[in-house]
Image (cartoon, rainbow, N blue to C red):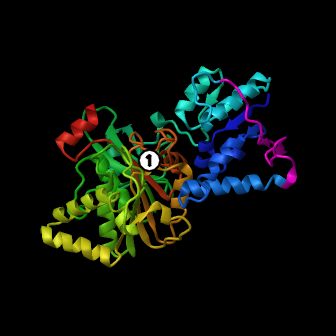
Amino acid sequence: MKKTFILDTNVLLHNPEAVRMFEDNFVIIPVVALEELDKFKKLNDEKGKNARAVSRFIDGFRGKGELAKGVKMSNGGILRIPIEIPDSKLDGLDQTRIDNQILALALALQQRGTDNIRLVTKDVNLRVKADVFGVIAEDFESHKVNIDELYSGVKVIETSVGIIDQFYADKKIVLPEEELHPNQFVILKDLAGSSGRSALGRVNRKEKNIVPLINGEQEIWGVKAKNLRQKFAIEMLLDHDVPLVTMLGQAGTGKTLLAIAAALRATLDERRYRRILISRPVIPLGRDIGYLPGTKEEKIAPWMQPIFDNLEFLMDQNGEAEETGEGTLRYLNETGKIILESLTYIRGRSIPKQFIIVDEAQNLTPHEVKTIVSRAGEGSKVVLTGDPYQIDNPYLDSNSNGLTYLVEHFKSQELFGHIILTKSERSPLAALAAEIL
């Protein structure tokens, strides 16, 4: 039996392709949702781009029939934009709010006998209100992953001491029967547990074997791995045959620090890349402080302060005096070796031969992550870091953000490496806060 999906505005802004993703069912876009889209069309950010894309998509159907009655889409579904604004009594709710008008439409259609009504919205509160009024509501789940089953990038394999000894002798062992992903890290442990023998390796799918780590023990810009998973992170960051890397972990696990240290080494010391491009989503923690005065650089500076903090720490670790470190930072900035960029200005670009770091990527939608990664030109490396449990975007959660979506869909690709960092190394206080708060 066919279903009728009523889409909230935030679903269309989240993914402009959403209209096509309900197979051969009925898709309704309330006219008030189109009115709300108009508020976003002139923006230069991702929401503005998505609003314009949705408007163009709908405009393409005007010549194929009457949108108010329903027009058939290529997937067999029917797109309809009903013009009525029902005068339903939603007791206790503000009737002027667009969210409540969308809910009123869903309730009215349901009362008229329309079968299988589903209100699709990213707004948790609207889903709760729909439930109160007896309307089935659901999240837009085409990009959902199960965070509890998210690929960790590490596999523990229990084997015999003989296999471990062979691995040390031959510098490789044949891949076991169990499923392993390209560049996945492997911890070989003694099956009997008596000898305490173990080994660290990484999957090489091309050669169909597990090989030892090459870079994990290296010091980069005064930073050495403080735990096993940081070794795995350094291994990936310094492997330039892996152009896409994701690092997940709670505060203080070293995600951003290791990424910047690797970028400095590869760009300044090894000269593999022309420059380092670092960006973060501009989403505030707590109340927004509003528009900021000044040039583009001055506007984004407050958002980039965590990056400066990490750069200053690396200068200290690299043995530079405070004045020298400040001078080095100023030199890197003035010569364009390090560029701090807003994600708004990345769209539409092709970025070759650069080390690109996107920090706090858990605040990006799957569509935004696709836009960013597809900007990477020839010879570039892209590193995305973030904590999927620390999300400030109101329409994303740990299961639906672009970072976890990317991990789940890229895990079988040879160009991709991933690790979840689990131990906070910032300070004993930071580790305790991350654990108990």
The number of numbered badges drawn on the structure is 1
Name the foreground residue: 344 vs 100. Answer: 100
Q: Quadrant of the C terminus?
A: top left
Residue 247 in view of the camera: no
Along the viewing direction, whichever of 153 and 420 lies nearer the viewer: 420
**Pointer 1 residue:** 362
Image coordinates for residue 364, horizontal then vertical, percent: 48, 50
- Residue 211's spot in the image, x, y percent? 39, 54
Specify the farthest residue to the bottom: 335
Residue at image position (21%, 60%) is: 313
Assess whether residue 366 is covered by the magenta stretch.
no
Picture coordinates of residue 265, whole percent (x, y): 30, 68
State the image coordinates of residue 151 (x, y, percent, origin top left): 46, 42
* First to last magenta residue range: 63-89
Main SS, magenta region, reads loop
Q: Nearer the viewer, residue 151 or 27?
A: 27
**Residue at coordinates 29% horizontally, 43% vertically from top-left?**
198
Is 374 placed left or right of 227 in the picture? right
Which quarter of the picture shows residue 277?
bottom left
Mark 1 residue element: helix
Q: Residue at x 59, y 59 (%)?
A: 42
Residue 430 occupies quadrant: top left
Q: Nearer the viewer, residue 272 or 231?
A: 272
